[in-house]
């Protein structure tokens, strides 16, 4: 039996009412006329939620297995401390997305603001993935402790990231190098290493993956097993 | 009317603006819709608006907006005002009852020109000095707006309630800027709400300044008194000082207030490097540290600016006739207007519009 999509008209509904309606709905849900209500889908599991309009801050915070599909842009705090599930954004995303993310996947079609993926972490099979189609603002992956961040730099910007991976002590960051960029980077790989991720991203957003697969990527790994040795005290 | 205590107020607020690029008029209900959408960013302890070109029938006069604690304060103020100014009209600012707005002071406006003729620059200095002196000296009287053909409307309450209280839907403006306040350390008071305004410049601010004391000491050296104990006041005075006394453009102002890091200046080409080095070295005390996003209104123009690390959210959108700014995209979407572009404003990127031309 095909499960029909349950529609929630979010106009004039508070964030609490929307989330209550989501909890009581079938697996597939469409939130229509959303306009800035916060915490949509927060901590939910087992649902597929399409969000039309603009979702508010902390959308999908603590997400625990649901799939969120944002038809517009995302505001600040997307997927804060997300545990499992998937968030897809058909647009750009504001600041501090994927903060402390512990599992699941976030796919952003366009760019993200500053401080994305700060202190993402992994444990056992829980490995978070943050994937960005264009560029990322400053401090991407600061204190990264685990998981994967990929910046596809689809518009071929010379500097698609800044201050990336400061204090990284786990996980891995890939940043696609613009075709016009002739600088030398330490650790460069091609797209085959992240083929599965690129394929999933391109399938979601209906993009051609060939160019991305055959591009060069900077790969950022933590410098040592103990990156803060000697930083705060000398022993 | 209780003034702010001895501590500064850090704030997590909402800011929004509608700027008509072609000069068409927008009624105040639109900006209320924007700021209301971001209700959760305020806590009911302050809100305010500024509208430009709202007093066309008195466009050449200074529109003085006043709060009074009582009739004594009002009488003292008026006796001084009538001595120094020609008063073309004065009236109580029309308000309607709103359950969310309580214990309001007496709120009056005066359309005036100084009796004594002065050059434009001297007249502006006279206006600022007179009004700041009144705020300092006359107990229970507070001037919160003094520009020509513009006016600030603010108070304690949620911004949408204050917009209703002041009946802003009856005003037509070419530019609206709004603020919803979330002070966390002290009770708000009517004068401490945003916008802060001097002459035709009005400022709203989301954030807090960690360089407040450095900025304040410098401002006191050049003659401003930071009497309100709020950081936003300091930004307003710095912009006033830089534009009016030093003759800087708003773009140059932005380059001083949110100057690039030395590490960025290092990488610049010579011309640019000299320019930024000059500004940083000579105007070091005007640098604002800490998180902020501000919107500054002035005659026929507007500026939006973020701090150097982009620690507060600020979104812009535009179409052919209008520029929209807001802390959250939802505030712009709530207007249900067609907009061509919608984007996040970057760290220390000044978005400046003057009617008829764009500088970015």
Image (spheres, coloured by chain):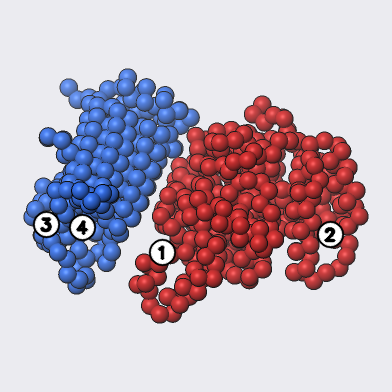
Closer to the camera: disc 1 or disc 4?
1
B310 relative position to B172: left or right: left
Query: In this view of the protein, which residue sits in the foreground, B37 or B47?
Result: B47
- Sequence order check: which comes first, mark 3 or mark 4? 4
Q: Colour of chain A?
A: blue
Q: Which residue is mark 2?
A: B113
B209 relative position to B156: left or right: left
Query: In this view of the protein, which residue sits in the foreground, A152 or B217?
Result: B217
Q: Which residue is mark 1?
A: B261
Q: Colour of chain B?
A: red
Callout 2: helix, strand or loop?
Answer: strand
Q: Quadrant of residue A1?
A: top left
Q: In whole angstroms, how far apart are the C-alphas of marks 3 and 4?
A: 10 Å
Q: Which residue is mark 3?
A: A191
- Label 2 CA crowd tier, 10 Å (few <14, some 14–19, many 20+): some
Res A13 visible: yes
Q: Give the residue displayed 83% in from the left and 69% down from the top.
A: B118
A125 relative position to A5: left or right: left
The numbered mark 1 sits on a residue in which chain? B
> Do the dots labelled 2 and 1 sit on one chain?
yes
Pointers 2 and 4 in contact (C-beta within 8 Å): no
The numbered mark 3 sits on a residue in which chain? A
Q: In whole angstroms, how far apart are the C-alphas of marks 2 and 1?
A: 44 Å
Closer to the camera: disc 3 or disc 4?
4
Q: In whole angstroms, how far apart are the C-alphas of marks 3 and 1?
A: 34 Å
Callout 1: helix, strand or loop?
Answer: loop
- Sequence order check: which comes first, mark 2 or mark 1? 2
Q: Which residue is mark 4?
A: A175
Residue A121 point in image, percent of width and height = 21, 40
> Do the dots labelled 1 and 4 sit on one chain?
no
Pointers 2 and 1 in contact (C-beta within 8 Å): no
């Amino acid at each position: 039996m095909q499960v029909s999509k349950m529609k929630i008209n979010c106009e004039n509904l508070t964030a609490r009412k929307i989330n209550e309606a989501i909890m009581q709905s079938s697996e597939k849900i469409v939130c229509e006329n959303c306009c800035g209500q916060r915490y949509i889908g927060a901590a939910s599991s087992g649902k597929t939620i399409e969000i039309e309009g603009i979702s508010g801050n902390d959308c999908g915070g603590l997400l625990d297995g649901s799939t969120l599909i944002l038809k517009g842009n995302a505001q600040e705090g997307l997927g804060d401390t997300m545990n499992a599930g998937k968030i897809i954004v058909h647009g750009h995303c504001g600041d501090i997305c994927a903060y402390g993310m512990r599992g699941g996947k976030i796919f952003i079609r366009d760019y993200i603001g500053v401080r994305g993926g700060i202190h993402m972490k992994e444990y056992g099979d829980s490995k978070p993935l943050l994937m960005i189609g264009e560029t990322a603002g400053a401090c991407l992956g600061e204190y990264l402790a685990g998981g994967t961040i990929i910046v596809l730099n689809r518009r071929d910007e010379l500097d698609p990231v800044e201050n990336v991976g400061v204090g990284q002590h786990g996980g891995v960051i890939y940043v696609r190098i613009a075709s016009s960029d002739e600088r030398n980077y330490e650790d460069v790989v091609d797209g085959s290493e992240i083929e599965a991720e690129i394929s999933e991203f391109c399938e979601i957003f209906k993009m051609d993956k060939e160019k991305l697969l055959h591009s060069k990527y900077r790969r950022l790994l933590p410098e040592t097993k103990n990156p803060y040795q000697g930083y705060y005290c000398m022993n | 009317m209780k003034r702010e205590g001895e501590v500064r107020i850090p704030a997590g607020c909402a800011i929004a603006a509608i700027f008509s690029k072609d000069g068409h008029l927008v009624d105040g209900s639109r900006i209320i819709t924007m700021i209301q959408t971001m209700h959760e960013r305020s806590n009911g302890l302050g809100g305010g608006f500024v509208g430009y070109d709202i007093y066309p029938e008195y466009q050449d006069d200074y529109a003085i907006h006043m709060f009074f604690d009582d009739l004594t304060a009002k009488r003292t103020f008026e006796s001084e005002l009538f001595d120094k100014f020609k008063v073309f009209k004065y009236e109580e600012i029309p308000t309607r009852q709103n359950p969310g707005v309580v214990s309001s002071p007496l709120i009056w406006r005066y359309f005036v020109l100084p009796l004594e003729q002065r050059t434009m620059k001297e007249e502006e200095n006279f206006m600022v000095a007179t009004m700041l002196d009144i705020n300092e000296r006359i107990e229970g009287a507070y001037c919160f707006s003094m520009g020509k053909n513009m006016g600030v409307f603010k108070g304690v309450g949620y911004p949408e309630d204050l917009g209703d209280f002041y009946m802003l839907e009856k005003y037509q403006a070419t530019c609206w800027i709004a603020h919803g306040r979330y002070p966390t350390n002290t009770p708000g008071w009517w004068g401490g709400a945003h916008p802060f305004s001097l002459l035709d410049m009005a400022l709203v601010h989301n954030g807090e300044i960690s360089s407040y004391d450095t900025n304040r000491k410098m401002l006191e050296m050049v003659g401003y008194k930071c009497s309100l104990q709020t950081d936003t006041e300091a930004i307003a005075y710095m912009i006033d000082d830089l534009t009016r006394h030093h003759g800087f453009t708003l773009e140059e102002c932005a380059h001083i207030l949110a100057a690039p890091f030395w590490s960025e200046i290092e990488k610049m080409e010579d011309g640019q490097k000299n320019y930024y080095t000059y500004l940083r070295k000579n105007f070091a005390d005007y640098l604002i540290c800490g998180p902020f996003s501000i919107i500054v209104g002035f005659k026929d123009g507007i500026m939006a600016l973020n701090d150097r690390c982009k620690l507060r959210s600020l979104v812009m959108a535009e179409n052919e006739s209008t520029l929209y700014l807001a802390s959250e995209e939802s505030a712009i979407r709530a207007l249900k207007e067609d907009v061509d572009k919608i984007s996040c404003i970057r760290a220390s990127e000044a978005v400046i519009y003057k009617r008829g031309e764009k500088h970015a």
